[in-house]
Image (spheres, helix red, strand yellow):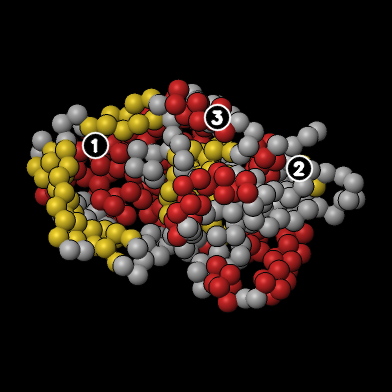
């Protein structure tokens, strides 16, 4: 069988045999700083030029979002952006602050500050409409063809309802207090946003998209396993049930400390979890993750990002070789890594097709 980049990546994701090791680095927080002439050609051409199998995460979705009555106005003063969201039940105010060193805007004041803001928040999401964008998503899948693989987004806010409330709507500390003080109101808002999220999954299930993800940013740095199981796990489980019925694959994105979230994630029916990172960036190694996860869940990551900065090339290669060696205890019918970077083959003869195990390099 002759493998294209797309077939090679799909085989790696599913734990099937490939002809050789796929390589597909994730370019977030890197590509934007390349010379303009490189950026103008796009990430696909950049990946192809380096000989990679392009894995394009978050470039497309099978839906669009629109609001009928709600609107947004913005005012900028210096390094501050003041955002006002107008709803039939009142206005919501948020502030973003620009940090030059990071070349990024950070949300420094969340729109929902107390229970008095909940009517406006409910109105905002009642006003939201999820519309099919299947034809355009299918067109993009067809346009890419066998040159690479699209990993499409799901979620009206590109993540589960509670995670969105934690990051963008209410904020970590405030959300925890409100969850304890007003559980009924929190549940009502979670269910409303989750209803919209499920519609995005329905659109995806009807499309030609084969793999999808949400930008979950899961981490116990801001969410306990107990709250994860109560508010997030049921929603993503429902997504996976619908996606699997239509032959789709869901990859869960995570950021930070996920050691105590691995089993809840696996119970959702996910195909893969990314990104696994040992300390100091994360709190779990590939070995530790493999020890607790069922073999059907693939792992993305494993290379500590700080080592890309501090190690010499030879030291980095030795480190990756050791990671690959440690992974040989993992059952060979399932890949231990995914998507971007270094991979380990089984110990079959060189003439046989090799089982793919890819690790993220970014």
Residue receiving disc 3 = 143
Q: Secondary structure at mark 2?
A: strand
- Disc 1: CA contacts within 10 A as few (<14), some (14-19) or many (>=20): some
Residue pictured at 61% horizontal, 39% vertical: 148
Q: Which mark is residue 18?
A: 2
In contact (CB < 8 Å): disc 3 and disc 2: no
Residue pictured at 43% horizontal, 30% vertical: 62
Q: Secondary structure at mark 3?
A: helix
Q: Earlier in the sequence, mark 3 or mark 2?
A: 2
- Disc 2: CA contacts within 10 A as few (<14), some (14-19) or many (>=20): many
Q: x%, y% of residue 12? A: 68, 44
Please tell me whether mark 1 or mark 3 is closer to you in this view: 3
Q: x%, y% of residue 4? A: 70, 37
Q: x%, y% of residue 216? A: 43, 50
Separation of disc 2 and disc 1 at Cα?
44 Å
Q: Which mark is residue 156?
A: none
Q: Earlier in the sequence, mark 1 or mark 3?
A: 1
Instruction: Work out whether residue 320 or residue 103 is closer to the camera in this orientation and state it.
Output: 103
């Amino acid at each position: 069988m002759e493998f294209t980049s797309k077939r090679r990546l799909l085989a790696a994701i599913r734990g099937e045999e490939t002809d050789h090791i796929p390589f597909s680095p994730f370019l977030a927080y890197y590509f934007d700083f390349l010379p303009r002439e490189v950026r103008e050609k796009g990430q696909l051409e950049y990946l192809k030029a380096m000989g990679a199998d392009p894995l394009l995460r978050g470039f497309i979705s099978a839906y669009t979002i629109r609001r009928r009555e709600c609107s947004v106005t913005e005012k900028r003063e210096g390094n501050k952006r003041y955002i006002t969201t107008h709803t039939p039940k009142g206005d919501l105010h948020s502030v973003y602050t620009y940090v030059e060193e990071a070349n990024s805007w950070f949300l420094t004041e969340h729109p929902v500050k107390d229970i008095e803001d909940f009517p406006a928040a409910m109105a905002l999401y009642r006003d939201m409409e999820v519309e099919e964008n299947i034809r355009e998503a299918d067109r993009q899948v067809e346009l890419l063809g066998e040159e690479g693989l699209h990993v499409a987004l799901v979620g009206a806010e590109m993540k589960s309802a509670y995670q969105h409330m934690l990051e963008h709507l209410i904020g970590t500390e405030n959300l925890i207090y409100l969850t304890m003080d007003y559980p009924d109101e929190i549940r009502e808002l979670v269910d409303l946003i989750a209803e919209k999220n499920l519609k995005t999954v329905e659109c995806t299930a009807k499309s030609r998209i084969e793999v999808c993800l949400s930008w979950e940013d899961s981490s116990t740095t801001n969410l306990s396993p107990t709250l994860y199981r109560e508010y997030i796990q049921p929603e993503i489980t429902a997504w996976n049930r619908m996606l699997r019925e239509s032959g789709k694959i869901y990859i869960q994105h995570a950021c930070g400390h996920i050691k105590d979230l691995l089993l809840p994630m696996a119970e959702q029916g996910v195909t893969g979890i990314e990104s696994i990172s040992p300390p100091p960036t994360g709190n779990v190694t590939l070995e530790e993750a493999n020890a607790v996860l069922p073999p059907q869940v693939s792992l993305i990551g494993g290379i500590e990002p700080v080592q890309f900065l501090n190690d010499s090339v030879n030291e980095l290669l030795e480190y990756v070789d050791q990671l690959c060696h440690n992974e040989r205890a993992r059952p060979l019918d399932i890949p231990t890594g995914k998507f971007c970077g270094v991979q380990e083959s089984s110990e079959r003869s060189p003439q046989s097709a090799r089982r793919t195990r890819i690790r993220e390099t970014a």
